[in-house]
Amino acid sequence: MAPKVQLTLNLDATHTPTTTLTEAAKRKKASTETLEEAWQRLASLKNDATAQRMIAEVKAAMEAGKIGREASAVASNKRLSKAEVKRLWVQVKEIHKQEVLDDMVANMPDNYWLIQTVERLDEFLAILDGEQVLVFDVETTGVNVYRDYLVGHVISAVDADLHAYIPVRHITKEIQLDAEYVAQQLKPYYENGAIKKIAHNAGYDIAILKNDLGITLNGLYFDTMPAMTMLNENEPSYALKKLVKKYLNIPSLTYEELFGKNGFETVSDLRVATAYAAKDGDITLKLMRFQQKHFERFPSIYKYFMEVEMPFVETLVETEATGFVIDQVYAAEYAQKLGSEIEELREELTDELNGININSPAQLRPELEKLTGQRLESVDAKKVLKPLANKFPLIKKYLKFKFDTKLYGTYINKLPNLIEPKTGRLHPSYQANGAATGRLSSSGGFNAQNLPPEAREIIVAPENKVIVGLDFGNQEGRIAAAKVKEEFLLKAFREGRDPYIALASIAYDTPEHEISKDSKERKRAKTGFLAYIYGTGDRTMGEQLGITTKEAHELKATLGAQMPKLAQWTADNKTFVKRNGFVWIGDNARKRRLPDAMKGEYRPLLQCSNARVQGEAAIQTKVTMNKMSQVLAELRAKGRDFHPLATVHDELLVEAPADITEAERDLLVEVMTQSYLLEGVDNESDVEIYMERWGDAVRWDEFVKERGGIID
């Protein structure tokens, strides 16, 4: 008998006969699939809009012979895949970008000037001597007005219809003029207030000119960015390129699309730089003319824009430039102490909650449901857990842990790192129309609007200075009273009574003198009053106050009985917005456009009354800040070192000399109360003095006493 032969096949899981056959089948299928069939197959897949665009652009580029398939894919006879198309799309976009740049240079208008020599600059300056209006823009290394610097000036001579770019600090071997020389030559034009200046997002340009070159811009006339917020506060983007593409049909790629995240100094081809930069001046001018034509239809809006929003651009620049002083030693000690307390709380909570990860909502929620014996919608701190905190000490401890963690990470440990080396201060950054109603918002790493009292402790008054806090007393309540003409509210304000205490007195049948400003009765009355303006529903109001929906409904009804005109006013606003798609703010100063209200949608109907009150509060704040800026400049001219410091909701902060006089205090109060008057109700403003830390306020009399007496 022949011996048996045993064969051993050494096959791993990734190379089975089945796999080999499958791969062979794929290669055969790939070898027989035409490119056109491949495109049809890819197009038949489930593609979103971006994928559809990607496939179409790569296909077009391949058919035009601009790109081919990846060599490795061709060598291995692979079918065209979506992943390969995605990689090819990167090449296509780079090719397209270069084509755009080449086209911009090849078709650059004759009135776009690249200025590289003294002779050419002198020729341009001679033209500027005859101009009354200029467009200006700055090209820079980045967007931080304290750390980045100017690499080129954009100036358009409007009457001559010339748009020039003057490069000064590009990384290039090409000729460019000395930065300091150009700055000195242009300074008289920038600082001449008789020459009107036009820009897009002028605040940034003004700050760069000041911080980098020591140039103070005068004569700002028109800023096309806030102008667009007047014409459409619902605009998805206020970027210049997107606006001119949308409204003027001028093809324009954004800076990032053309140059990525690099600073403009990296553009070494100065003709490319000019084609891009000079166009900024050109299209800014075109956009302004387009906006002015539309403003002709709304003269009251245009009047408000020119008288309030335009001066406010410079007011904000000045306010941001002052900056806060941080007590860095105290901040470091506070951070260390707070960090230890947070870790201790974490250990306690982890132990009390059976060792779970307390930062995991999925793990936390079941444990809290066991603790409370009720189903929780979520572990949302404000909406769900806060109403339970008084009943359950562990939840109260958890909320403290969450608050302290945010305080540490967002403020105490972070803010000292945001101090600008150039100024030694922490600078807020504001959006003049951060809300659609025109209300300010704070942006960037330092949000001055949301700074909690605990975080204010690390901010101090500079040496020989104090921080003066001036607030609008019950700003939105007074505006509502003036708009509605509600006698109950007007009478309370006339008599110097707190309207919310007056309402609470009726709602809870309690004498006014027994209700304090921080009582739950006053808080409930105020919330109920604002519920009419904000359109807050009974359920939401109940959640805000920790009462039942039925109790919230009954409270609103009681308050409404005292203010019948308020209920009617809100109803009239809903009727108006449903018919017109907008409501007026102020004295027809601006619109809050709510077009979906015309479709009967619920949310815009709720927003319309709030928009009118909040919007007018924003107007009052801006008018007052403009006046405050003017008054403080007049005080500085007299040798008194006053500066606008910040705006926080309904409060203005002023950096003042420690020897501020009573007359100067009265002047600041006068600005707060008299700059924007309301019909039928007087404005009011309280004064607080922060002698050392922003968080530690004293009243004027106490300040005078601690300082050692009144200074005339």
Image: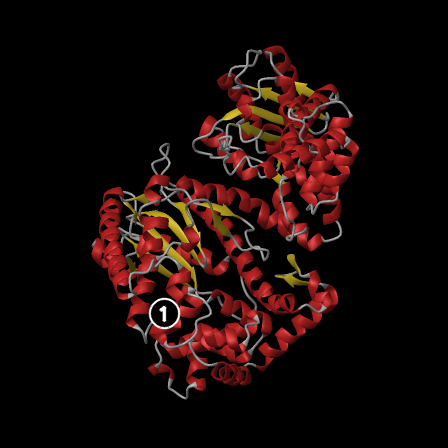
Residue 31 horizontal/vertical position (percent): 73, 29
Q: Is residue 220 visible?
A: no
Locate residue 69, reporting x and y percent.
68, 26
Q: Is residue 517 shown above or below 250?
A: below
Name the residue: 64% across, 65% down: 604
The one nearer the camera, 530 or 345, is 345
Whole-percent x, y for residue 125 in the image:
63, 19
Q: Residue furthest front?
A: 1
Q: Which residue is mark 1?
A: 368
Instruction: Tell which of 518 and 468 is nearer to you.
Output: 518
Displayed quadrant of residue 274: top right
**Relative to 100, is 429 on the left or the right?**
left
Please provide percent x and percent y for residue 592. 64, 59
Label 1's element?
helix
Q: Amino acid at mark 1?
A: Leu
Residue nearer the viewer, 380 or 123: 380
Res. 365 visible in picture: yes
